[in-house]
Image (cartoon, helix red, strand yellow):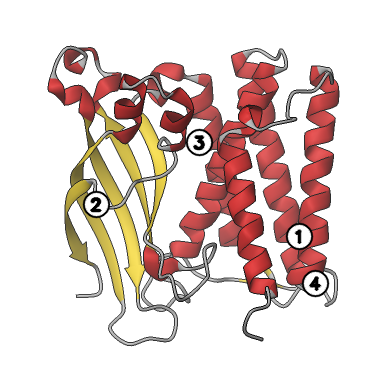
Amino acid sequence: MHGFITPQHLKNLFFVFLFILVLSPTDLPGMETHFSKEETLVLSNVIGLTAITTWGMINWDYFKNDPKKKSEGWFSDTTKNGGMDKLGHFYFAYTLSRVLAAIYEDKGYSTRQGAALGALSSFGMATWMEIGDAFSHYGFAYEDFIMNLVGSVTGYVLRSHPGLSEKIDFRIEYQPKFNQFDISTDYDHQKFLMALKFDGFHFAQTTILKYLELHLGYYARGYPDHKNRERNIYVGIGINISRLFKRFSMPKTARVFNYIQLPYTDMAIDRDLNR
């Protein structure tokens, strides 16, 4: 009904809040606690698994069907979303791995320990979500399981190697369609990319190159039911927005742009794989 908050609105508000929490967990009011590092580890996983279970039972039909599995394919033209959902799984597991690692390190774990525990926690939560899917109308997809694993491992590698993390980001770009309140699966307005940041290299530290970066990305359009489907790979050069915010002493905002690509801040050449 017009004027009321629908389940879809609640779902996307949940994802917005989760995303803010994920990107800046220690900066939110009331997040500082006196839990030990071990208690924080257990509590974060309990909260995460409980939230997934509760949300899945309310909105995703978890545990209402007999278990089933299916193959969804990867990035071919015949898949439901052209592979965008697979990159979504990678991005979720990767981001969650990085942020949980930061929380654990803040509580006293070493960089390597925090990175490992963050990756394990992320993969555990993502796997539990996939198990829930198995008992819903979605079904367990091994492709999603693999991308969850790859995302968690990638988060571990970058978090445990700060020098590498200074050079590479994995991001999502989203250009919303404001008359369609859909975020998590609005693949027609998303892009996923890897950014190679020049400011992570010594040769660029004293030149204007430190504000630039190279992009390698992927996006699909027109899936699942529309004509004129596209699957595009692109390369481009962009502005390092995170570096700009660091320049103006805004480190919290800068951190967000390690995970989000601001639209219209790059120039790219793309190729449609469907042609």
Q: CA distance from mark 3 to mark 4?
A: 29 Å
Q: CA distance from mark 2 to mark 4?
A: 44 Å
Of the numbered discs 4 and 1, the one sitting upstream in the chain is 4
The one of 265 and 51 positioned closer to us in this rendering: 265
Give residue 67's position: percent from left, percent from top: 80, 72
Of the numbered discs 3 and 4, the one sitting upstream in the chain is 4
Tell me the quarter of the picture where residue 191 sits: bottom left
- Kindly tell me whether residue 107 is visible in this rendering: yes
Give residue 9's position: percent from left, percent from top: 63, 69
The one of 67 and 248 positioned closer to us in this rendering: 248
Q: Which residue is mark 2?
A: 264
Q: Which residue is mark 1?
A: 131
Q: Is residue 172 left or right of residue 160?
A: left
Q: Residue placed at 52% from the left, 71% from the top? A: 181
Disc 1 is placed on an element classified as helix
The one of 169 and 138 positioned closer to us in this rendering: 169
Q: Which mark is residue 67?
A: 4
